[in-house]
Amino acid sequence: LRMRIEMKKRVKLKGRLKIYMQMSMYLGLLLLLVDIGIYFLDIRAGFLITCFLVFYFAMILYLMLYNRPIIINELVSFATQYGQIQKELLRELSIPYALLDEDGKIVWNNNAFARAIHNEKALHKSVTSFFSSATKDRLPTEEEGIAEFEISYEESEYIARFTRISLREMADDSDIIGEEDYRGCLYAMYLFDETALKIALRENDDQSLAVGMIYLDNYDEALESVEEVRRSLLMALIDRKVNKYVSGFDGICKKIEKDKYLTVLRKKAVAQMSEKRFELLEDVKTVNIGNEMAVTISIGIGLDGLSYSQNYEFSRTAIDLALGRGGDQCVVKTPEQISYYGGKSQQ
């Protein structure tokens, strides 16, 4: 109430509203000039208009003095209600929003922000206590104005945008804050939920195609070490091991030569294989039907290429690297790195 009274005392009309309020006075002055001209034509007519003007100005002054406080009161009421509506809309804004002081402590937040951090009592707490990566040194400087980076909270991931609000401009028109007080700042913090997008991107990346090549390192030597009648059985057991392993990860395996296989896998399947260190490398060695030499294989996988053909070239490069290192191992090649698994047997 006190604030509204102070606002009424200090409100000064300007612009079109001020002109509208003063228009009747301007018309009265115009009539006064006309009245002066009429005196030169007819004194009685001029006197009559003068009497009317006295009454007119008296009414105008009364209405201006009487109506002005009423109009000012309506304007202040509208501004107050408008501010409350804005505040309520901001509080119910679907985007999590908070105001931070220059030390990064929360001084105000809306309902969406409270729901995002699962805490209704976040006031006066440091934003770092909820988002560990939102440290004070990452907040925007006066030169930057805006800073944006990724943060996470529990299982949700956000893009956080911080806007620096200088108190200097706010203090210029204030009668409360002195010159020595307006060097501080506030930070407006917005959170944009990227959780669903990140999940979709990861799922899409997991479904991307990977190409693999599987070569038998010692095909001829292994066959020579077993009786001729058992050679077909040996190869059938190896084929079964390879196909069962690849199909277990929902992949496709095609034998392209007597000792070579082409496989098509999802990137997620390659990650699952690498977690178990490509157990096919050791599983194939267990095939023994009397052969003196254990069968070993080499695996080359290419993924994350710009096209399927590039992944295929990556797999060819990977298998060459595996064979060049003595075989009995898996090499996974991406545009950024090459990873090696196995390689326990002698060359």
Image (tube, rainbow, N blue to C red):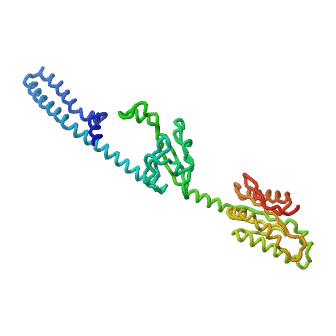
**Residue ID at (53%, 35%):** 143
Describe residue 123's horizontal placement relative to residue 2 as left or right: right
Between 232 and 123, the one nearer to me in the picture: 123
Q: Is residue 154 above or below residue 227?
A: above
Q: Residue 96, position in %: x, y?
A: 47, 52
Q: Position of residue 268 (x, y in %)?
A: 67, 63
**Residue found at the very far left of the displayed protein:** 44
Q: Quadrant of residue 63?
A: top left
Q: Quadrant of residue 207?
A: bottom right
The percent position of residue 48, horizontal first and vertical second, equals 8, 27
The N terminus - image quarter: top left
Q: Compared to 54, does 88 lie above or below?
A: below
Report which quarter residue 31 is drawn in.
top left
Position in image of residue 5 (x %, y %): 26, 39
Using the image, determine if residue 106 lies above or below residue 175: below
Q: Residue furthest top?
A: 40
The quadrant of the rendering that contains the C terminus is: bottom right
Left or right of 200 on screen, residue 222? right
